[in-house]
Image (cartoon, helix red, strand yellow):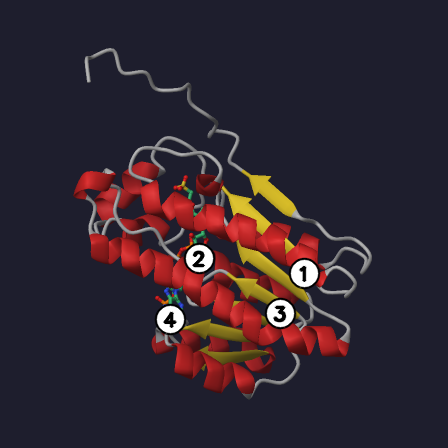
Amino acid sequence: MTALVTGATSGIGEACAERLVADGGRVVAVGRRTDRLAALADRLGPALQPMALDVTDRPEVERLLGALPAVDLLVNSAGMALGLEPAPRASIDDWDRMIETNCRALVFVTRLLLPGMIARGRGHVVNIGSVAGSYPYPGGNVYGATKAFVRQFSLAIRSDLLGTPVRVTDVEPGMVETEFSVVRFAGDRARAGKVYEGMQPLSAADIADVVAWCASRPPHVNVNTVEVMPVQQAFGPFAVSRTAG
Ligand code: NDP
Ligand code: 8X3
């Protein structure tokens, strides 16, 4: 089994790479930070092939993925939230980067790998969506919308792939302690740490466990969507404004 894991230099993608190698697979690990990729390769040995790549660089994505050997499992984990500002004050550049990474890059990478999977009669795409794609929260505006896109794209390509053995799954986590909040808050580790203070978030390994479970079902089983939260996270009531306007 050969997997391509994007976002493998940190968090959920890194944990997926570790888990898939531990389970006996080979992993092509994609990320921009070459020092992280080198450390991962040192740690996981020859089963891990590092691939320094910015998934938003479409010509590079086409060049490098076009030269790949057969990929059986694609885990699209590269992604981010940037900022938590309400829409009228949010950075348009941040919005642009989220859309570019979480949506455009994800669909291009997927599109490039699907024909090979179909031709070989074997393949599985696991996208890392988010509960933010189903449940809106203040400041989650474009981030949540990108994850709703990932959810719908995942379901939609299931329709397109009917009649082929290729499987598609959207794994939608709640709070997972990774570098996610550090990135969201532009490197402010103190603010990021507060997100998980006083509660037990999911770990990246918890999500890797879900991904590994989805990927190891018998070939006739497609897990469409998995939503998973920490026990200490749930839903809020509708917000109601009682001021005029
Ligand atoms: P991390 O910040 O720890 O990891 C993000 C990964 O994405 C890094 O490896 C980063 O690598 C990679 N990445 C970002 N941009 C690019 C790019 N342009 N090209 C290649 N790689 C890129 O966060 P998580 O592991 O938590 O996030 C992984 C996914 O999980 C994201 O899609 C996120 O939205 C989703 N998610 C996270 C949740 C959480 O609470 N943590 C909950 C729900 C979903 P590098 O910088 O080296 O390129
Ligand atoms: C990350 C989960 O709730 O921080 O996608 O948006 S949340």
Disc 4: residue Cβ within 8 A of ligand 1's nearest atom: yes
Residue at the spot of label 1: 160
Q: State the image coordinates of residue 136 (x, y, percent, origin top left).
A: 40, 34
Q: Could you tell me which secondary element the residue under label 3 belongs to? A: helix
**Mark in the foreground, 4 or 2:** 4
Mark 1 or mark 2, earlier in chain: 2
Q: Are marks 3 and 2 in contact (CB under 8 Å)?
A: no
Residue under pointer 4 = 56
Identity, as a three-letter code, of the amino acid under mark 4: Thr
As shown in the figure, which amino acid type bears the numbered disc 1?
Answer: Asp
Q: Does residue 19 show up?
A: yes
Residue with the mark numbered 3: 21
User: Residue 203: image x %, image y %?
Assistant: 49, 47
> Could you tell which of marks 3 and 4 lies nearer the N-terminus?
3
- Earlier residue among tags 3 and 2: 2
- Mark 2: is the Cβ under 8 angstroms from ligand 1? yes
- Camera-near label (3 vs 4) is 4
For label 2, count other residues whose C-alpha is less than 10 Å away and answer few (under 14), some (14-19) or many (20+): many
